[in-house]
Amino acid sequence: MRLLIGVLFLLGLCLPQKTCAQQKPLWLGEELRYRIHWGFLPAGYATLSSTQTAILQTRPAYAIASSARSTGLVDALYRVRDQNLSWMDAEHLYSLGYQKKLREGSFFRDETVFFDYERLQFFATSLNKKGEVHHSSGPISGFVYDPLSSLYAVRLKELKVGREYVLDVNTKKNWPLRIKVLRTETIEVPAGRFECFVVEPFLREEGIFIPKGKQMQVWITQDSERIPVYVRTEVFIGHVHAELLERSKRN
């Protein structure tokens, strides 16, 4: 199931500049709900939401959350209950850190990572099934994104067909995420009919959910909301796609 919803979280184009966040993002207070299929087989549901939260590391921050839940036959064969949380600096929109709690069949991972920009270090804490805690740290290249926060950064970018972007990402390893805007296309999903940019990220390392080298494409609306309405990614057998069911917004 990591291959099911992770496709939603691996884009990021906005550099950490004040011009990116002079006003509150349009996605603030939003909740997106997706239906996921593996081929023609219903596989589960995923949600994305964003809120304003308290001070983190002396910085005002936005909290971005995702969840994934398997259903039906997939749930019986491979039960999934995933939760992820990312904190974005509210002024500059780079990542302050992220947390993931993954429960996928026998797979278990609890991990929290914070980015210290004064020391240019990440600090990570992980917990395994036995209850053992492991601490680690390492260098970061400067302002970085985690895969979840990067999706929300891209929604503030003026996309153009044919343009490529590179973003510095850290998932306890520094790696460049290259993104290309392929084309425009009209697509219809349960939430409606949308004019979209079709965007493809090229993964050089493993993201939070997606193994490197796997192809995926994301349909993002051309309007000012920049809503990710459809995602398609290849997996080891066949492909997985996620389609937007509904979008709600709190003021």
Image: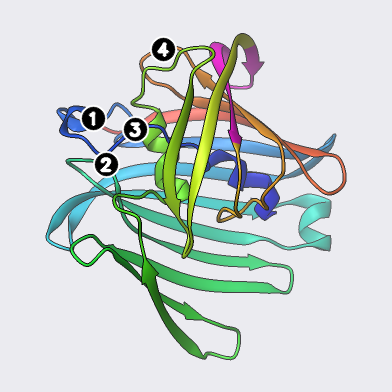
Query: Which residue position holds label 2?
Result: 93
Which x, y percent locates residue 4? 68, 46
Query: Which residue position holds label 4?
Result: 223
Question: Mark 3 near mark 4, Cβ–Cβ under 8 Å?
Answer: no
Range covered by the magenta-colored residues: 187-201
Question: Mark 3 near mark 1, Cβ–Cβ under 8 Å?
Answer: yes
Tell which circle, 4 or 1, labels the residue nearer the N-terminal end: 1
Tell which circle, 2 or 3, labels the residue nearer the N-terminal end: 3
Query: Which residue position holds label 1?
Result: 20
Task: Name the image quarter holding the N terminus.
Answer: bottom right
Give, as a three-letter code, the residue at label 1. Answer: Cys
Pick the front one: 112 or 178: 178
Question: Mark 2 near mark 1, Cβ–Cβ under 8 Å?
Answer: yes
Which x, y percent locates residue 36? 69, 39
The local secondary structure at tag 3 comes to loop
Which x, y percent locates residue 177? 51, 41
